[in-house]
């Protein structure tokens, strides 16, 4: 199945990807609260890493309009999942977000033919395009 209008489908999927990345960034901001209550506590390095990841996820949501946006968002899924090393609940939360991200890539592949490639421009005079 391919999209009737690949440009509209691309915009819609990029918007969904941006929304997921922003939600991931917000979820990462809840991790320091959980870590602070553990015996190890929340150190400066852990807090810095989490804040950098949260800001990176939100910024990646903003660059979804550009071609490398999906690649950046996909690369950030790995550190998101690895936040489970800091707080065990993040294995579940990060895993759910990674599954949502993979689902978006799968839908993009089904609608556009490839999860990362840009859609080919439609021909104006060709009604089959």
Image: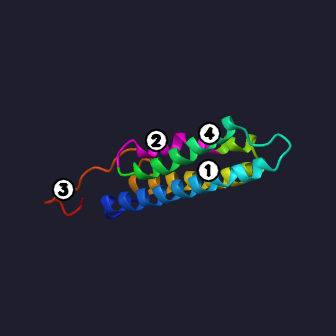
Q: Nearer the viewer, mark 1 or mark 4?
A: 4
Residue at image point 47% right, 41% down: 72
Crowd around label 1: few <14 · some 14–19 · many ≥20 (10 Å):
many
| Sooner in the amino-acid sequence: mark 2 or mark 3 | 2
Residue 32 included in the magenta stretch of the image:
no
Alpha carbon separation for disc pair 1 and 2: 14 Å
Please give left or right for residue 81 compared with residue 88 in the image.
left
Between disc 1 and disc 4, whose residue precedes? 4
Which mark identifies residue 31?
A: none
Q: CA distance from mark 3 to mark 4?
A: 49 Å
Q: Secondary structure at mark 2?
A: helix
Circles 1 and 2: CB atoms closer than 8 Å:
no
Picture coordinates of residue 116, whole percent (x, y)? 42, 45
Question: Where does label 3 land, which residue?
Answer: 123
Quadrant in the picture for the C terminus: bottom left
| Front in this rendered view, residue 56 or 47 | 47
The part of the chain drawn in magenta is 66-80
Residue 48 marker: 4
- Taking the view exactly as shown, the residue that stands out farthest to the left is 125
Of all residues shown, which one is farthest toward the top?
Answer: 45
Q: Is there a contact, CB below 8 Å, between mark 2 and mark 3?
A: no
């Amino acid at each position: 199945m391919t999209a009737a209008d690949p440009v509209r489908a691309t915009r819609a999927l990029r918007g969904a990807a941006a929304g997921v990345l922003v939600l991931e960034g917000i979820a990462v901001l809840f991790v320091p609260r959980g870590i602070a209550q553990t015996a190890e506590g929340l150190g400066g390095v852990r807090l810095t890493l989490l804040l950098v990841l949260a800001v990176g996820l939100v910024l990646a949501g903003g660059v979804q309009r550009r071609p490398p946006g999906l690649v950046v968002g996909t690369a950030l899924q790995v550190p998101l999942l690895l936040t489970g090393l800091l707080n065990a609940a993040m294995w579940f939360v990060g895993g759910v977000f990674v599954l949502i991200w993979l689902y978006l890539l799968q839908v993009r592949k089904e609608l556009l033919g490839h999860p990362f490639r840009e859609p080919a421009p439609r021909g104006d005079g060709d009604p089959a395009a």
